[in-house]
Structures are given as structure tokens and as C-alpha cells.
Image (cartoon, helix red, strand yellow):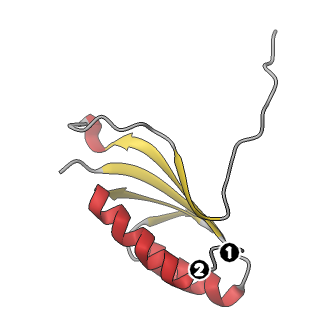
Amino acid sequence: MSRRHVLVSYDISDEKRVKKVQKVVSDVADRVQFSVYCGQFSKKDLVILKDRLRKVMNQDQDQVLFLDLGAVHGLDDEATDLGVEHLGRPWTPKERSCLIF
């Protein structure tokens, strides 16, 4: 089963829920910054993590982002698009104009 590096970032609006989300994420990933973690996950691992997070967060007020950084050790037996997923509030990047030098 292939494993992928995933960056997990959260924005939680209630301090009690912050601690619960922090506990869930810190059990499976390494802290990079205050609310940013990086871990190695299989598809099954991510399903379990997302299920645990849904139980402690408010889907209308909170947000957790998952950024796929690519295959662990460059071994990618399953072609997977790199991208951003979310739980709770949706995230969409803002349109930016191109810089021309």
C-alpha cells in the first residue's frame, strides 16, 4: 500500500475544539508549526483521520486542510493527483494575476 506525505493544517474557532483537534492530529503526524503538521499516510490512514476529526470539529465554523505533498521515498504505485482537500469550511485559492518581468 502506498504512503504519501500529507501536510495537515487546521483553523478551529473554539479553544476547546482546538485542543481536541490538536490531540487527534498530533497522534498521527509531526508538528511543523502551531497548527500545521506533516505525516505519512495511506488512503486508509487518511479516511480514519478524517473520521476522527469530523467527530470533534464543527463543520460550519472550523476548517482542516490536507495538502498532498507526494509519495513517500518517490515510490508511487498509485497515480494520485496532488491537491488540497478540506473538512468543514471550504477553501478555494484566490485568482491571482500573473507577474510578468
Q: Quadrant of residue 80?
A: top left
Disc 1 crowd rating (10 Å Cα; few below 14, some 14-19, many 20+) is many
Q: Name the secondary structure under disc 1.
A: loop
Q: Which residue does the numbered mark 1 point to in the structure image?
A: 12
Position of residue 65 measured from the top left corner of the image (x, y, whole percent): 57, 58
Position of residue 78 measured from the top left corner of the image (x, y, whole percent): 25, 38
Amino acid, disc 2: Met
- In this view, the residue farthest toward the left is 1
Residue 33 against residue 83 in the figure, above or below: below
Q: Is residue 53 left or right of residue 15?
A: left
Q: Residue at x 44, y 43 (%)?
A: 69
Q: Residue at x 67, y 72 (%)?
A: 62
Residue 17 against residue 101 in the figure, above or below: below
Amino acid, disc 1: Ile
- In this view, the residue farthest toward the top is 101
The Cα–Cα distance between marks 1 and 2, rounded to whole angstroms, is: 8 Å
Contact check, label 1 and label 2, Cβ < 8 Å: yes
| Quarter the C terminus occupies | top right
Q: Name the secondary structure under disc 2.
A: loop
Q: Is residue 9 left or right of residue 80?
A: right
Position of residue 3 measured from the top left corner of the image (x, y, whole percent): 27, 50
Q: Quadrant of residue 18?
A: bottom right
Q: Residue at x 78, y 33 (%)?
A: 95
